[in-house]
Every structure is written in structure tokens, then in C-alpha cells.
Image: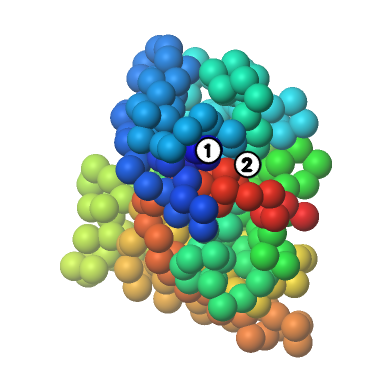
Amino acid sequence: MTALALDVGGTKLAAAVAADDGTPLEARSVPVPSNDVWGACAGLLRQVEEIGAGPVTAVGIAAAGPVDTTTGTIGPINISEWSSGFALVDAVRGLFPGARVDLVMDGAAATLAEQRFGAGRDVADLLGVVLGTGIGGGLVLGGRIVRGRTGNAGHIGHVVSPYGTTVCACGGVGCIETVASGPSAVRWARAHGWQGPDGVALAADAEAGVGVAAAALERAGTALGQAIASAAALVDVGRVVVGGGFAQSGGHLWRPMLASAARHARLRFVQDLRIVPAELGALGTLTGAAIVAAGHDWIT
């Protein structure tokens, strides 16, 4: 019998065989195509199916949000073909009739993976934050994903920031994603005279002493610390794992984030809050999908 993992990201699709302990084996990946995204997903799943031992009995799916676990649909903002909704669970069930198919949000999958194998493996309760082109997240309590009513619990990117005045891609105003994602920090820096191309250059210029670049990262880090402190108090966690490409921006992001969180997390039960870098990197989300595929003890 074979369990498979599928990771549907905004720019990349990945699939793997899920080992019994939830680690992904023989991973395959392709960029998200401009059309026939399902065809690309199905092709990847068929590739890794051939590596497995026997018929496919389970598929764990981690997908960019928003998701709807009640209907098995996803509507990733960055995949235009699916942005209005795609019945991914039904499509996978059609590919593997009789298999158990479970869908989780990508941030929740990455957080579960960090709790099992990464920076949160010594705690049962963990909040995950994923910084990239957007801001995602997930929540694990008691060693299990908290999915919420529709599967989007822990999606910290749409907590409203005091710094936020910009309309978000979601339609709201002031989401932390409009302040502290990579593109948002770059956009603010450019509005204040910086002329660099992206978040990597922004971090490099901040390290080199370019004032506006450092200010953009300080603004993003301060806003993140506020949001993390608020979320930690709401769900009563003592550990937060921060990952994603923009999380690699160095001390000019991390120092204000840690200071801001410490300034706001003053209740006794969050005064020992620890914010740490994720350890699993790009494999985190696929690993979470593999954990989901391997067993059913991952959900509250």
C-alpha cells in the first residue's frame, strides 16, 4: 500500500511518497503552469505512484490558501486558473478511487512538520508563520493541526496591523501581509526612494547600511512582532516558528520582530514566548502533507 503527498504552492507543485513516519521520499516538483494546473498535479502524482509499493490508499494535500476543507476546494490567489475555486479533493479521488484524501492549508502543514521534525519538535503547541510573497501560518495544539471551521485557522497574514493602510489582495485593509511580506516591504522602501529589485536586495542593502532598506525591514519586523504577540496570547502558545524566503532577511528583520513581540507579550503566560527560525526550509510543506497522508492522528 502507498501513501502520497502533494504540495500545491503559489509557484511550485511537488509530490512524494509518504513514508510510515511521515517523511517525504523521492520528491518530484515542477513550476506551476499557466494553464492545466490539474494536469501537472496529476502527472506528478502518477510519477511518484510508480515509486510506491502497491495501490495508493491515502493522499495528503497541502495547498496555498484560502482552502475550504468542508468542500475540498482551494482558491489560491497566486494561481489564476484556480483563484475562483477548484475541487481538488474530488479530482484526486477521481485519480485514486477508494483512497483517503485529506486537505490542509499549506501553512498548517508546514507548522505540523516543524512540530514533528523541526524547530518545534520538543513542544506540543506551536504557531507557524511563513513569510514570502504573502504571509501564511498554521496552528498546532496538542501535537495536532487546528483546522478551524473551513481549514484556515492560523492564517496570521490577515491579522490587521496598526501600520497597515493598504488594501490587501483579500479585499481587506491593513492586513499584516500588506506590511511585512517581502513584496510589501520592497514596495514601502521604493516609495521612500529605494530602487532595488526585490527582498533579497533589500536585506543586502540593509546589511550594507542603506538607511531606507533597514527602515523597511524594521517596520516589517515590528509589525510582525505585534501580530505574533497578539496571536500567541489568543491561542496560548509558547513557541512560534518563522520560516519562508523573506524570513532569511537577517537581523534587520529579526531584531525588531523579537523586540516588538517582547514589548507586547506581557501577560504572564506569554512572557516566556520564544520565536525561532524554521528548520525544514522548502521541504516543510511537503513534509506536512506526508504526515497527513501517513496517518489520521494529525487533526483535533
Q: Nearer the viewer, residue 172 or 144?
A: 144
Describe the colour scheme in one phrase: rainbow
The picture places residue 191, in percent across and down from the top left corner, at 37, 45
Q: Which mark is residue 63?
A: none
* Residue 137 visible here: no
Give left or right: position of 175 versus 242: right
Q: Which residue is mark 2?
A: 104
Which residue occupies 59% across, 34% down? 57
Distance of label 1 from label 2 (alpha carbons): 22 Å
Q: Which mark is residue 1?
A: 1
In terms of secondary structure, where does tag 1 sit?
loop
* Residue 207 visible here: yes
Where 149 falls versus 268 (above or below)? above
Which residue occupies 35% across, 73% down? 251
Where 85 falls versus 16 (above or below)? above
Which residue occupies 44% across, 20% down? 42
In terms of secondary structure, where does tag 2 sit?
strand
- Determine crowd level at label 1: few under 14, some 14-19, many 20+ residues with C-alpha closer than 10 A: few
Q: Nearer the viewer, residue 283 or 224?
A: 283
Location of the C terminus by quadrant is bottom right
- Which amino acid is tagged 2? Val
Which residue occupies 56% across, 58% down? 111
Most extreme residue toward the right is 149
Looking at the image, do the residues carrying marks 1 and 2 touch, with CB atoms under 8 Å apart? Answer: no
Disc 1 or 2, which lies upstream in sequence? 1
Where 238 falls versus 247 (above or below)? below
Q: Nearer the viewer, residue 130 or 92?
A: 92
- Which amino acid is tagged 1? Met
The picture places residue 68, in percent across and down from the top left corner, at 70, 32
The picture places residue 246, in percent across and down from the top left corner, at 38, 55
